[in-house]
Amino acid sequence: MNPMPILLGLVMAAAGPVSPIELTFPSGTKTSTVTGEIIGSAPQDYQLEGKQGQTIAVSLLAESRNLRFDVMLVKDGSASLIGRMSRGGTWSGRLPADGQYTVRVSQVRSGKDDADSEPADFKLTLTFSE
């Protein structure tokens, strides 16, 4: 699968400013879990470092079926989409290169005014394996 390039600036401009959160993995573990909330069209980004050939599993649990996540390799000011899962669920794949990765959690537009969107709580879990 060839990554699809996306201009990170365009993605950020469309949804407003994003304050990324650096994911940490407790000593001796390969799993990190965070909880969060998405309101309207403002996404939440999580950053982590990965190595080429590592397998990463990303799981999104939420009551709302309007949430999705994108897994992107960030390099030289742009991002390449390497995985996506809509409506929650789990995605797994091999990382194509060493570098910084972003997992973006966002709401799928429902056609109504985003300002009226209900807050959506979620639990995001990332697991690395060799």
Image: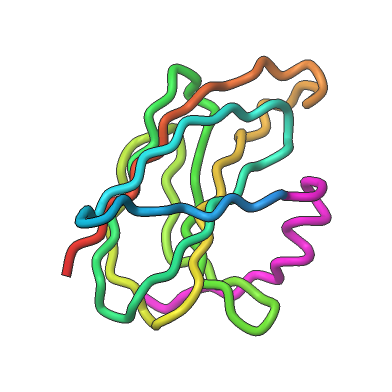
* Residue 124 drawn above or below residue 20: above
The x and y percentages for residue 98 are: 40, 82
Give the residue drawn at x 27%, y 49%. 31
Most extreme residue toward the left, as rendered? 130
Q: Residue at x 54, y 27 (%)?
A: 66
Give the quarter of the image for residue 107: top right
Screen quadrant of the N terminus: bottom left
Which residues make up the magenta segment?
Answer: 1-18
Above or below, 89 relative to 76: above
28 vs 42, nearest the viewer: 28
Image quarter in which the C terminus is found: bottom left
Instruction: Report the residue at 38% width, 29% height from top.
Output: 61
Q: Is residue 14 above or below residue 111?
A: below
Q: How many marks?
A: 0
Q: Is residue 125 left or right of residue 28?
A: right
**Residue 28 sits in quarter:** bottom left
What residue is shown at x 34% (from left), y 73% (from top)? 95
Q: Is 1 in front, or is 20?
A: 20
Task: Report the side of 89 relative to 3 (left or right).
Answer: left
Q: Left or right: where does residue 24 sit relative to residue 47?
A: left
Image spot of residue 52 (x, y percent): 32, 81
Taking the image as shown, residue 14 lies to the left or right of residue 71, namely right
Give percent across and percent down for residue 34: 43, 37
Where residue 22 sits in the image (x, y, percent)?
Answer: 53, 55
